Image: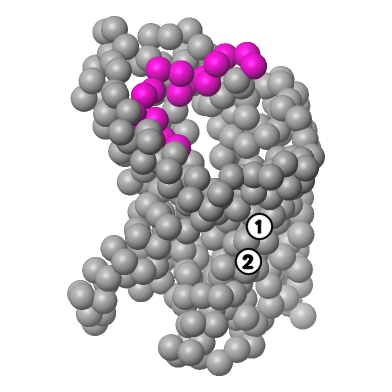
């Protein structure tokens, strides 16, 4: 039976909420720095994301007329809690002690909550820009979530388990699933970019069109929590893709987990998540925002079709694996 003190430290300290908070701020800084250097700019200092968070937390909270204050306060907190909970099931140093059969499905649904939060905030704001942004967020969600789910469920089909730690264990004894599922890996990266509403999928928060979309009426700690949720989602999404396609903290054909292997695994986890971030930052710099109708065409015609092709290929590979 797992020690309750160990579980508490795992959840709160490392690799739980405190590590997630620190690492998300570091990735936010690194993302902004990479984008700046690619655009021939200097970029912010390393403490800028933390300074921005503290500044927003200290700002006054202004309630739009007719808005339910309690609900407006609760929605960002629920979104933040959902993302933090999802991270607990993603392997960071070894297999997650909280893992259970089906935790992949739970994580995928928990990562849906921030998008629903944006929709509700936009709808409740009583602001035309916020409402349009919220509707765009919901519309965009229905476009990218289907291929995203298909791309991330394909590794589960091949590994024969719906547990993220189980998929990582399969890759430890075999090889990284990206070699079997390159199409799914690319689809997952594109859909993660859309889920995080990063360029070219920053349609709900198009600053040149609708101010800040569903965030227009948010101030103070509400805005701080939403921005923090986005930064945490970047870590969770990068870690999830690294776990499902790149073996997470494990290297194929390594020894059984030990404290030394877990230290090495943590370093491997950092390298893999940073590699995913580099790809996402490069996409952000190299592209411009597209329209919602263009996303609809691209999403259903090409991205969803590619995800279905990948699932079909996995089923064929599994059949040949069993029969041959």
Pinpoint residue 174: horizontal percent, then vertical percent.
66, 81
Determine which quarter of the picture holds residue 255: bottom right
Label 2 neighbourhood size at 10 Å, few (<14), some (14-19), many (20+)?
many
Disc 2 versus disc 1: distance between alpha carbons? 6 Å
- Residue drawn at x 65%, y 82% is 252
Q: Tell me if residue 82 can be seen.
A: yes
Q: Is residue 217 left or right of residue 182?
A: left
Question: Considering the numbered disc 2 on the image, is that residue within a helix, a strand or a loop?
Answer: helix
Q: Residue at x 27, y 8 (%)?
A: 66
Residue on which the image places disc 2: 272
Instruction: State left or right for residue 274 relative to residue 163.
Output: right
**Residue placed most toward the observer, 240 or 198:** 198
Q: What residue is disc 1 on? A: 276
Please identify the quarter of the rendering in which residue 13 is found: bottom left
Which quadrant is the C terminus positioned in?
Answer: bottom right
Q: How many numbered circles does the render carry? A: 2
On the question of residue 225 being in view, the answer is no
User: Is disc 1 placed on a helix, strand or loop?
Assistant: helix
Horizontal side of 159 relative to 10 (left or right) equals right
Vertical comparison of 256 with 277: above or below: below
Locate residue 152, reporting x and y percent.
Answer: 60, 54
Say which mark, if any, is on residue 312.
Answer: none
The location of residue 267, given as percent across then percent down, is 56, 75
Q: Nearer the viewer, residue 249 or 12?
A: 12
- Is residue 188 in the magenta section? no
Please state the horizontal and vertical placement of residue 30, each as a whole percent of the image.
60, 53
Badges 2 and 1: C-beta atoms under 8 Å apart?
A: yes
Residue depicted at 61% across the width and 21% down the height: 206
Describe the colour scheme in one phrase: one colour
* Towards the viewer: 99 or 311: 99
Residue at left offset 32%, top offset 11%: 64
The region drawn magenta spans 208-228
């Amino acid at each position: 039976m797992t020690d309750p003190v160990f579980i508490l430290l795992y959840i709160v300290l490392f690799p739980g909420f405190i590590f997630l908070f620190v690492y998300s701020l570091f990735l936010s800084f690194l993302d902004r720095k990479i984008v700046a250097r690619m655009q021939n700019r200097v970029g912010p200092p390393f403490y800028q994301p933390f300074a921005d968070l503290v500044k927003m937390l200290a700002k006054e909270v202004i309630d739009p007329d007719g808005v339910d204050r309690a609900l407006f306060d609760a929605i960002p907190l629920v979104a933040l809690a959902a993302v933090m909970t999802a991270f607990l099931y993603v392997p960071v140093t070894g297999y997650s002690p909280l893992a259970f059969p089906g935790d992949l499905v739970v994580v995928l649904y928990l990562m849906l909550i921030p998008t629903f939060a944006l929709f509700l905030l936009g709808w409740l704001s009583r602001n035309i820009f916020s409402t349009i942004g919220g509707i765009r967020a919901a519309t965009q969600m229905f476009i990218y979530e289907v291929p995203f789910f298909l791309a991330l469920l394909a590794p589960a089909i091949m590994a024969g388990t719906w547990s993220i730690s189980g998929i990582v264990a399969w890759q430890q004894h075999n090889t990284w699933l990206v070699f079997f599922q390159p199409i799914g890996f690319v689809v997952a990266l594109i859909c993660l970019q859309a889920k995080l509403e990063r360029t070219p999928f920053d349609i709900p928060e198009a600053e040149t069109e609708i101010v800040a979309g569903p965030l227009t009426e948010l101030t103070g700690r509400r805005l701080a929590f939403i921005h923090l949720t986005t930064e945490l989602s970047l870590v969770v999404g990068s870690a999830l893709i690294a776990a499902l396609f790149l073996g997470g903290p494990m290297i194929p054909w390594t020894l059984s987990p030990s404290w030394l292997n877990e230290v090495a695994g943590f370093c491997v986890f950092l390298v893999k998540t940073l590699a995913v971030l580099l790809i996402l930052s490069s996409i952000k710099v190299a592209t411009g925002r597209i329209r919602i109708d263009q996303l609809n065409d691209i999403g259903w015609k090409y991205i969803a079709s590619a995800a279905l092709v990948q699932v079909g290929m996995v089923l064929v590979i599994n059949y040949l694996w069993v029969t041959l």
